[in-house]
Image: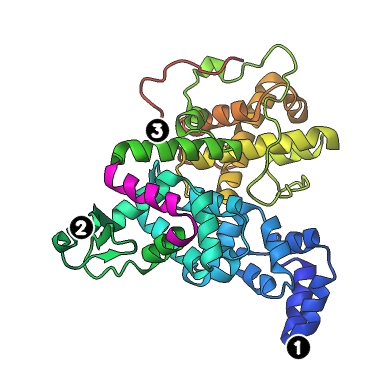
Amino acid sequence: MLPAGARRILELAKRDRGAARAALAALPAEEQVALICESPVARRAELLHLVSAPEEVIPLIPPAELCFVAKAVGLTDAGWLLEHASEEQIATAIDLDAWSALAPDRGRLAEWLAALADAGEETLLRAAHGIDFELLVLLLRSRLRVLLIGRDEADEVPAGGLTIDGQFHLFPRESGDDLEDVMGLLTALFSQDYWFYNRLLQAVTQELEAETEESALRWRSGRLQDLGFPPIEDAKRIYSFVRKEQLAKLPSGPRALEVGEWPLPVWMPSLPAGSEGDHLLFRAMAAVGEEERRPLLFAFLALANRVAVADELPLGDAETLPAATEKAARVASLGLAHLARENAVEPTALLGRVSLERLFVVGANLAGSAAAQPRRDEGPAEALPPRAPTDLEDPEPL
């Protein structure tokens, strides 16, 4: 649903586009970003086209939100948006959208490269220096073969190749690939940063594929952890097996929140205010004080990120965060209801004693049990990923 402010501006734009642009420009850049990010993804491009100073507003958009908008517009038409994006926004968008499980998706990388090329040479060069060198190597290797032939050996050059400098000769791996976007990148690098160009093509001919991919994954994993997405083996702890007799056990005393704040790649969501129809977890969070609620919000977002990674949801899709958030709230509420009932403790009081991850683990075990019957506060049980057959112990200390 469109926020009231966005609706007014878009309705005004139908009658007087100039007035709509002026109304949006009258807001501070941060408020323009809020208006855009709180609108449905499919409508954000309409608002962005009304922004008078895109070079000031677009760099302030959280990087994942920029990725969502670029995909909603279509990467083939997103050059105008990426033209004003920062290196961090571009790198994060590629981290989120150009990977399949734990491997780079060469096809998606090529689509992002083409979109960046459409944004202009300056944007293309910023992106080349902002994303991992290893990703560029993997992308180029998937598109072309490179032969290094000295100038005095020109008569040995096979037919059908392209060259910029007379030494590196480039041949498409697939017939019909004109390499237009690749040649645009290499030509820009050759004229603006020759040593980067030279090192890149040398790496395409010499670096081992497996080692290059492993390095790219390591760099990406580190950045995703900084954004709150844990490694997949860590994330899957939320589906750990807990023995039945341990499910209702509580820690002996208060438990400090283990999750701090981090730069969110998405717009800070506003959780439900705790109405009767909300998940039990949200109602309990709404009942605590404002000072306690903010760290709980980050703890909840960390849990939702774990769900997204553990379930191998596409991190570059706008639907992933709402889906992971809904599942995190539903399953953790199941665990919260069970612990509150079995220990005769108010759900709100449990939030200071039990981590949200632990609540999810308990809820996942209950939902995965054929004997578990959903109660009014628990919501429906759902199918969960199968537990590892060797995971027989309770892995998280109480």
Q: Is residue 164 above or below residue 259?
A: below
Between discs 1 and 3, the one toward the N terminus: 1
Q: Is residue 332 above or below residue 205?
A: above
Which residue appears at 48% of the width and 25% of the height?
Answer: 240
- Residue 160: name its quadrant: bottom left
Whether 310 is among the magenta residues is no
**Residue at image point 75% right, 24% down:** 352
The amino acid sitting under disc 1 is Arg
Closest to the observer, 359 or 13: 13
The residue closer to the viewer here, 381 or 50, is 50
On the image, the x and y values in percent for residue 146 come to: 26, 54
Q: Which residue is mark 3?
A: 386
**Crowdedness of circle 2 by 10 Å Cα count: few (<14), some, many (20+)?**
few
The circle drawn on residue 15 is 1
| Res 36 → quadrant | bottom right
Please report the bounds of the magenta region as a residue range. 190-206
Q: Quadrant of the N terminus?
A: bottom right
The local crowd at label 3, few if under 14, some if 14 to 19, many if 20 or more residues have their Cα within 10 Å, is few
Is residue 377 visible to us here?
no
